[in-house]
Amino acid sequence: MSSQEESASSLNKPTRHFPVPVTSKDVTTPDEETRSLQPPTTREQPQAVHESTPHKPPPTAKVAPLVGGSSSAAIITSQRSTTPHEGTSVVGTPRRKGNKLDVLSSSFSCVSLSPTRTGGGSERSSPVKELLHADRMRNLMSLLTEKSQIIEKQKNTITRLQQDCKKKDSQLRLLTLPQANEGNVGGEANVGLSAPVKLDILSRKLDEAYYELEKAKSESDVMRDKISDKDSHISQLETDADRYKAKIKLLEDKIVKLEGYLGNTPTMEEHYSMKEQVTELHSQNILLSERLREKEDKIMAQIDELRDKETMLREMSINIRDLKQDNSDLRLQCETSDRRLVELHSDISQYKIELMKSKQQITELEEKNRQDLRDMRERHKLRFQEATAKLKEQYKTVTKRNRQLELQLLKNSDVMTALNNELKLSQGTVADLKSSFGDLVKQNQILMEKNYGLQEPPEVGRSGIVSVSPVSDGSDESLQALSQEVSQCVEEVDSLVSLASSIFEGKEPDMSLLLGGGATGNGDHKTDSELDPARKYEQQLTQVQKNRKEIERLREKVTDHFASKVANECHLQ
């Protein structure tokens, strides 16, 4: 009996309620479809948002408890009801009206990335290449494939969990139905003992299954949130595509308008030709207007004369009327008036003749005016031709003058190059002269050493007689060379002083003096016999040393100054 009581108590225990999530995201309404077409605020991927946001609990759904032990199946009742046109599945997965992948593929197939043809027939690059990049298309396709994979996974898990629930329900029914049929009294002892144990095991398994089911439902909710975000991103891309289509149409219309405008506008050559024609016609119009003014003045004078004649004719007509009245009054005086009438008729005929003559004169004047206009046009053409011929001749003379100037420039450039070459040669000769002057200085030093050797006191021999070494012919020659060198140095100093004075005064220097050609001595200077030769040689040596330093300093200054002056003049020319 204890086993039966335990089984009855287990049957009377309240069963656990496991909510089945039926979210509002499973049902798509037309308002949500219109909201999905609105552009999103950000272009980021929606995955990071779902990872950071906490999981929201699904709406409550009640499970009916087991009543009376007759049936142990859980009856799932949802608080939300779905309409027939929204079409949800058993667990709440929405049955979509249309696949958005097909919608996007159809929308983007309309937008062609190839160059569009405008009304003018010329191919132009579409601005869609700048707006839709390949990276964005790849992101779109990856999002669509990811969405389809997630949907398939969720469908598989939901179907698997549904099958597990059905199996558990069938097992519970099989276990609870025999217990209910037997009642409280009777029954086999073996069945009464094993049924509670099996029921506990099955209840535990059922709890585990419901726990797994709830876990899968929460995961499916997260995945549904991701799918909804992906749907919003896809709707954003659809709106962007529509916007880009409108922009493309506007740009195509603008291109067609611009091509029409460019086709109607004249080219630059036509514009310049029209401008030249307008200027020519304007000048012709000015000349013709001046001549027309002169002719109009003449015509106005003739018109004034004609008006005077018309006034005279009016007066004559008035007189004729008066005469007619007098004739009517003086019919009685026919004899006297007949003569007068004859005279008047003759006058009238004369006036008619004069009128005819005046008309002929007017026609002749008109013909003359026309002929004058023709002559004016011909003269204007001749003057224009003469002016063009003069301009051509002037252009030829100017071109000849330019050619002559170019030839002069070439000649001047040749002269400048020749002067530069001469300056370089002169600089080279100056350097050679400096080197030769250095050689002369060395020779001068050798001669000075020989002179010091000659000035040493004579050696005293053992016998006490001063032995004077005889002066050789070579020493005489060296002394003569020394005297010549001293005289040449003095002449060079004089030439350099004259060069410096002429340059600093602004006069043109002598090139022979500048290069040192005019400073060579002739060697005809006579030595002063009255002076002591040793003393004379010492004075000459000191003078030579001073002259050498002055020569070097002055020649450097003069050459540098003249070279800078020549260079400045060449640069200015």
Image (spheres, rainbow, N blue to C red):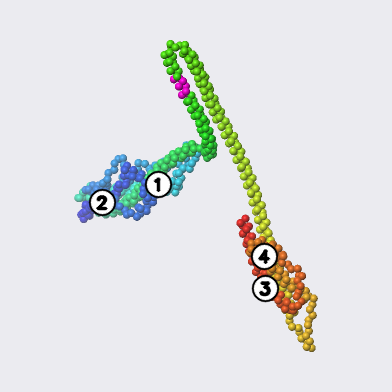
Q: On the image, numbered disc 2 is attached to which residue?
A: 17
Instruction: Mark 4 or mark 3: name the one nearer the start of the chain.
Output: 4
Q: CA distance from mark 1 to mark 2?
A: 37 Å
Q: Position of residue 196 (x, y in %)?
A: 25, 53
The residue labelled by disc 1 is 144
* Mark 1 to mark 4 CA distance (whole Å): 101 Å
Magenta-tinted stretch: 310-318
Q: Disc 3 residue type? A: Lys
Instruction: Give the x, y percent position of residue 265.
Output: 49, 38
Residue 451, picture quadrant:
bottom right
Q: For mark 3, does the 10 Å Cα neighbourhood hold few (<14), some (14 to 19), or many (20 or more) residues?
A: few
| Front one among 210 and 176 | 210
Query: Of residues 58 and 158, which is closer to you in this image?
Result: 58
Q: Percent position (x, y) of residue 373?
A: 55, 30
- Residue reaching furthest bottom? 463
Q: Quadrant of the N terminus?
A: bottom left
Distance between mark 3 and mark 1 Cα atoms: 106 Å
**Mark 4 sits on what residue?**
499
**For residue 546, which numbered disc appears in the image?**
3
Kindly state the secondary structure of the residue where label 1 is placed: helix
* Comparing labels 4 and 3, the label whose residue is closer to the camera: 4
Q: Is residue 234 magenta?
A: no
Q: Earlier in the sequence, mark 4 or mark 2?
A: 2
- Decide whether the magenta segment is chiefly helix, strand or loop: helix
Name the residue at 24% across, 52% down. 15
Nearer the observer: mark 1 or 4; the answer is 4
Q: Amino acid at mark 1?
A: Leu
Give above or below for 232 relative to 471: above
